[in-house]
Amino acid sequence: MRVSDAMTRDVCVARPDHTIEDAARMMLAIDAGLLPVGDEDRLVGMITDRDIAVRAIGEGKGPGTAVSEIMSQDVKYCFVDEDTAHVARNMGELQVRRLPVVDRDKRLVGILSLADVASHENDGRKVGNALREIAQPGGEHNQGAEERGRGM
């Protein structure tokens, strides 16, 4: 199955100049913990509720802080025409539950979650294997002090 068959197309996007309060309110309104950050039609980052808690509030930044100051700029994504089994394996390796979906011009067209894959796949092993890898400690998006270059 293709990513285009399983992804969520209606995506709420934050802008880099939004405040983290704006982003938090957007997350609250759509009941999500993650927002892609876009500049015009280009994906430039991702912001999560954890980013707001750890990278902003935890470091003493206020609600008026720009999303661009705390968003992750090294964004992993998948293409709309990729196979969901391949993407689910990549999600496991990257230890992420959601990926932004872009077209071949790298314009944001949706979000793919493991739940999206699970609800469209007949074989739950792909999602189970990805989730097992995601559940491993650490990973690329670990927000511990070591990641930011400060030892404990």
Image (cartoon, rainbow, N blue to C red):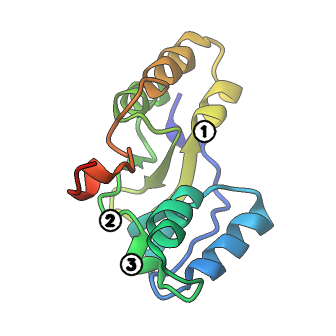
Q: Residues within 10 Å of mark 1 (few under 14, many from 20)?
A: some
Q: In which quarter of the image is residue 30?
A: bottom right
Residue type of the residue flagged with mark 3? Glu
Which numbered mark, 2 or 3, is in the foreground of this view?
Answer: 3
Mark 2 → mark 3, Cα distance in angstroms: 10 Å
Seen in the picture, residue 97 relative to 147 is either above or below; the reply is above
Is residue 42 visible to us here? no
The residue closer to the viewer here, 57 or 130, is 57
Residue in the picture at 47% in, 85% down = 66
Left or right relative to 4: residue 79: left
Left or right relative to 19: residue 134: left
Which numbered mark, 1 or 2, is in the foreground of this view?
Answer: 2
Is the Cβ of the residue at disc 2 closer than 8 Å to that at disc 3? no
Q: Quadrant of residue 112?
A: top right
Residue in the picture at 64% in, 55% down = 33
Q: Circle 2 is placed at which residue position?
A: 73
Where residue 28 sits in the image (x, y, percent)?
76, 65
Seen in the picture, residue 144 relative to 56 is either above or below; the reply is above
Residue type of the residue flagged with mark 2? Gln
Residue type of the residue flagged with mark 1? Asp
Q: Circle 3 is placed at which residue position?
A: 69
Where residue 144 sits in the image (x, y, percent)?
36, 48
Q: Circle 1 is placed at which residue position?
A: 5
Mark 1 → mark 2, Cα distance in angstroms: 27 Å
Label 1's element?
helix
Q: How crowded is mark 3: few (under 14 residues within 10 Å), some or many (20 or more)?
A: some
